[in-house]
Image (cartoon, coloured by chain):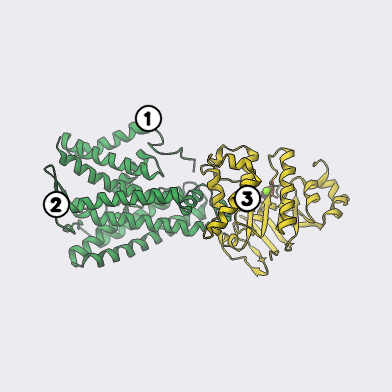
Chain colours: A green, B yellow
Amino acid sequence: MSLQIWIDGLFAGSVFAIIALSMTIVYQPTRIMNFAQGEGFILGAALGYQMVGVWKWPLIQSLAVLIIAAALMGFIMERMVMLPVQLSGSKFAWIIATLAAAMIFQSAFNIKYVNVTFSYFDIIEKDISIFGAKLSIQKLLVILMMIAVFIINDQFLKRTLWGRSIRAIAHNPDTSTILGIPTKPVIKLAFITGTVVIALVGFLATPVIIVAPAAGLFFTIQGFTAAIIGGVGSPKGAVVGGLMIGILDSVVRSWLGGTWGLFSTFFVLAIILILKPNGFFGKRVEGR
Amino acid sequence: MSDLRIEGLTITYGGAKALDNLSIEVKTGEFVALLGANGAGKTTTLRATSGLMRPAAGKIFFDGVEITKVPGHKRTALGSGHVPEGRQIFPDHTVEENLQLGTFVRRKHRAETTQSLEDMYGLFPRLKERHKQAAGTLSGGEAQMLAVARALMSRPKILMLDEPSLGLAPQLVLEMFKYLKRLHAEQGLTILLVEQQARLALQLAQRAYILERGSVKIEGKSKDLINDPRVAEAYLGTAS
Ligand SMILES: Nc1ncnc2c1ncn2[C@@H]1O[C@H](COP(=O)(O)OP(=O)(O)OP(=O)(O)O)[C@@H](O)[C@H]1O
Ligand SMILES: [Mg+2]
């Protein structure tokens, strides 16, 4: 099997891993799997298309605007999700709230971009060659970003008091509050950080994969699948799960043809859920 | 200073009143007990004071400043400590991480918080032996020690404890209360204690409030209450 297939799989896997990581960042203090998360990916793709592709803005300026816009989207998303959750008290409120947020953002993208698919030129048009296989700088950037997001998230959770507080909030927000931990601001910040991360990968990956405005839920499901395979809430799990479905998809696709890629992903998901119901690195998920 | 004053506090759970125009006061350096039957509103009083519940009416003052609208986490920084009902330790965090979380509001003073950690280990050697263990694996009594130690890690000016004796062996209950008494006497810690074991609480505290259906029914000096026939009949009957 050619090395190219593995490199392409590594790239796709890194995209899924970053999506899963961004969902993990929101999950850590809230224990909510945000089904609207993939809309952040579309925001990155749409703004990339608009600013880099159409307006030909310089990179730095585009990035700055993207980060601000994504932060704003994260802020709005937090209100759309947490307000119903806090007000209703139902343990299923988060499902409806995050799906509703996904639909609202998806409609907005669809209205603005009728019949458009997002694509634009690589930001840095250059390839490097590894034993005859090609790896564009664009793809390399995504892989490096995945490694960076993983290390930062993992170390932050394990080594800092703030990281420990985030785990504490997930377990018991009231007790965290009486210890002086600013529970609600931390949750806001998690939504903002998660959205900025996923928007950045949307921005970086779109020139390679070409993205439709309505594809947000597809990316959400890929990230969700990766998180479940790896173990929900674990940064390590997000990376392992993401890489696994990315590489699997690429290998199976080249071997049996396109439609089998997605099939194999969900087939493996089913097997893993039977063998390891909490994923590779997941703790038992408490009833919510 | 660590005056706590609650004025006319009313709290409802979807229409039902858990607190009904409740007023209590704890002066700096006092040791006050909050007693009452199950469902009288003791836990609700402490939770409201910690900013976990939004009052329908009434005001809360700390050190003479109104804190009714101050968010809960900022009240800890002002000097309120709370050992919640049922311990509520973080089971997946280690014992030491639980204690460190208690220093959240003092996190910028590294040297001081390291010292506090040593102090707590000195007080509760059992916690030191288990400092790397997940807190969820502690026994009930050890978990209670951890909950008290964790609250003390923030160096509160006033400490509110919600039934700290629950589930502890009688010997340990005495030990813990002896320790609280010492903190009160030596360091001037202000204490508001919610306790089912009314007789024990009245022996420790200088004053007490007895709640009934969300308002104060009886209040007074502990030594008067112990001898009060109304109290003896309803609250001291079989306790201890
Ligand atoms: N989450 C809640 N939802 C609805 N009602 C509640 C809730 N929590 C408490 N209550 C009600 O508020 C009233 C006061 O409860 P609270 O927990 O303050 O009592 P308590 O004095 O601490 O009792 P106990 O000694 O049993 O701990 C009770 O009638 C209780 O049923
Ligand atoms: Mg109670």
- Position of residue A167 relative to residue B73, above or below, is above
Q: CA distance from mark 2 to mark 1?
A: 40 Å
Q: Chain of mark 3?
A: B
Q: Are marks 3 and 1 in contact (CB under 8 Å)?
A: no
Could you tell me which residue is drawn at 68 percent across and 46 percent down? Answer: B164
Between residue A4 and residue A224, name the one nearer to us.
Answer: A4
For label 1, the residue is A275
Q: Percent position (x, y) of residue B29?
A: 73, 61
Between residue B3 and residue B68, name the one nearer to us.
Answer: B3
**How many marks overall?**
3
Please name which of the two marks, 3 or 2, marks the residue nearer to the observer: 3
- Callout 3 secondary element: helix
- Callout 2 secondary element: strand
Q: Percent position (x, y) of residue A31?
A: 45, 47
Q: Are marks 3 and 2 in contact (CB under 8 Å)?
A: no
Q: Percent position (x, y) of residue A246?
A: 25, 42
